[in-house]
Image (cartoon, rainbow, N blue to C red):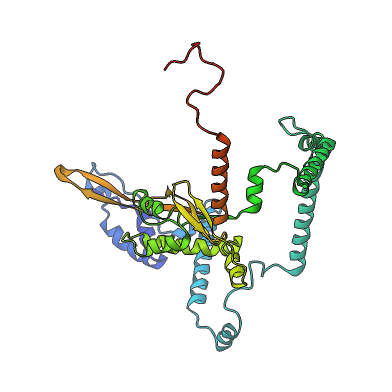
Amino acid sequence: MSLNVPSRRLLKSAASPSSTNALVPALQSLSITAAAAGPTTLSTRSIHTTPSQQWSLFGWGKQKVEERNKVKEELKQTELARTRKPTQEEIFSRVRGRLEGDSIFADTTPSELAAEQDKHKDWAVASAEKKLAAAQAKDHTPTGISLKKDHLVRVVDPDPRSRVRWERKMVIRKLQRGTDPWSVEPKAERIARTERKLVYKTGYLPTSVKKLVHLSRQIRGKTVSEALVQMQFSKKKMAKEVKTELLRAEAKAIVTRGMGLGKAAAAAAAGQAQEPVKIQTKDGKHMEIRDPTRIYVAETFVNKGFIRGVELDYRARGRVFRMTKPTTTMTVVLKEEKTRIREHQERVAKKLRQGPWVHLPDRPVTSQRQFYSW
């Protein structure tokens, strides 16, 4: 009987050749010769005591050993540099100088940096020239539209002479209507020229249209002072907000439109008092107007805004409803009393033009029947 021992594993596990030589007698004492073991035993393998560093086939093993030693040396130098304490001069230089690096181009010399900049500049100029040449050489878009200047001008202004004649005609017409007393000026232009108005839209108020519409109807048709009194004594929660918005609208109308400057009050103070004008509104209300420049609320309307929040309403049988919190805006149109005077005069003139009412007027029969169907 013999004991087979892997000699290569033993040699690898050994720390040095001296320790390997020391293990040889012990290993030889464990082996049993073939004569003592009998004819059934196997022959033992001889043990090699050559160190692992001496094994090399065509120099390969020696090259690996050299690389391993080189890596160990680099790691050792790095560890020494990391654990080395800096000198006093190095500490002073770090404290007095900048802690961070100058820039990412600190290692680049000025000549190399200038060369790189010139190279980039040349590339940018070449690219721009290339694009310009391509644009000049390309006369049409991929869809077939011409890019020439003359063609583009023709598309934008196909008939320049006709356009100039039309502009000249419009200027002459406007001057004629403004200077000729016998010219027929459109009614809308005449009203915009002689009367003033302001359209003011409030911000988003935290209420619903159904609630704010009552306040909107309450101030419609009243003067600004009367509307402010109504909002001051109203029990509605949004009355205070509407009053604030009315004050803002009145201030904006006075500053930007020159409304409500009180020319009648100034004339009365100078001793030239004007007689009040009695009118009837389209609602049938009679009133006297002493100051044609007084501001009143001509129109008001309410619009929806955005949803400012949502709450859950827990109901019976496990149901859940959504309660939305709306916002609303109110638009106010302010005008002067001279507008209300004009509207009254137009209604009176229209009524006079109609003539008396006739039960059966003398008019041609235009229906299918040749007789009246009373």
Where residue 91 appears, x then y in whole percent?
55, 85
The C terminus lies in quadrant: top left
Residue 57: image location, x then y, percent: 52, 51
Residue situated in front as seen by the camera: 71 or 118: 118
Q: Is residue 114 left or right of residue 329?
A: right
Residue 46 is at least partly visible in this image = no
Identify which residue is drawn at 51% across, 62% down: 250
Total marks in image:
0
Q: Nearer the viewer, residue 298 or 215?
A: 298
Q: State the residue lying farthest toward the left.
A: 317
Q: In which quarter of the image is residue 266?
A: bottom right
- Residue 299 located left or right of residue 135: left
Which residue occupies 45% across, 56% down?
222
As displayed, is residue 117 above or below residue 329? below
Residue 35: x and y in percent read 25, 48
Position of residue 3 in the picture relative to residue 286 (left or right): left
Side of 275 where 124 appears, left or right: right
**Front residue of this view, candidates 284 and 253:** 284
* Quadrant of residue 159 within the rendered picture: top right
The answer to whether one can see residue 59 in this image is yes
At 47% from the left and 55% from the top, the residue drawn is 287
